[in-house]
Amino acid sequence: MFYDRFRSTGYMTNWLARLIARAIDARLKPIGMSSGYMPVMFALAHGAALSQRALTEFAAIEQPTMAATLSRMERDGLIVRRADPDDRRAWLYSLSAEGLDKSIKVQEAGREINEAALAGLSGSEREAFLAALAKVVSNLESYLTKAKPADA
């Protein structure tokens, strides 16, 4: 039996995600950024200071990955870290002035690459595509919430 990867939701969405990341990385490389910073940039772009836990939840990534990302972003001068006045063990992160400037370029890159990815789709096709993706994400989040740890 032939396995048609082009009819596989997992294969196609993974391929799409990798292509989008490559395109965004190419667009951001000249300003010293990568797509890995985008979730943090988006979470902090409105000026809020957030904890590592809040950023991890926002980005839906594992805590060790977020810790490494924040460390690199702090090293690169994109974020500042200050003690959380409500929790002596925690830190709050916000964008630095340089990070705020670059967040605008990151948003522009995201819009440009999204537009390129959706070129040729009508407005209603774009809405249907995004609605379908949101439903698939919700289905999998629900599945993983209900799955036993050994199954997930």
Image (tube, rainbow, N blue to C red):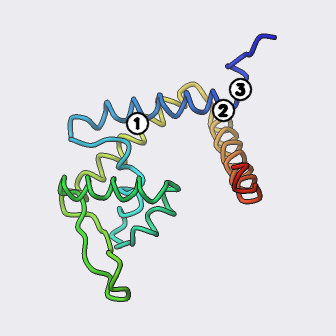
> Is residue 90 positioned above or below 145 on the image?
below
Query: Mark 1: which secondary structure?
Result: helix
Real-space Cα separation, disc 3 to disc 2, in angstroms = 5 Å
Mark 2 is surrounded, within 10 Å at the Cα level, by few (under 14), some (14 to 19) or many (20 or more) other residues, namely: few
Residue at image location 36% in from the left, 64% down from the top: 44
Question: Farthest residue toward the bottom?
Answer: 86
2 or 1: tag closer to the N-terminus: 2
71 is higher (above) or lower (below) than 25: below
What amino acid type should be assigned to the residue bearing mark 1? Glu
The kind of residue tagged 3 is: Ser
Q: Is residue 107 above or below residue 100?
A: above
Q: Which mark, residue 37?
A: none
Q: CA distance from mark 2 to mark 1?
A: 25 Å
- Give how far across and how far down residue 35 sits, in percent: 37, 42
Q: Amino acid at mark 2?
A: Gly
Q: Secondary structure at mark 3?
A: loop
Name the residue: 38% across, 45% down. Answer: 36
- For the residue pair 73 and 47, the one nearer the viewer reads as 73
* Quadrant for the N terminus in the image: top right
Q: Which residue is mark 1?
A: 112
**Disc 3 target residue:** 8
Say which of 39 and 128 sits in front.
Answer: 39
Q: Mark 3 vs mark 1: which is more N-terminal?
A: 3
Label 3 with label 2: CB-CB less than 8 Å: yes
The residue at the point 23 percent across, 67 percent down is 80
The residue wearing badge 2 is 10
Q: Measured from the top left, where is residue 118 in percent x and y?
A: 55, 31
* Left or right, residue 74 beside residue 124: left
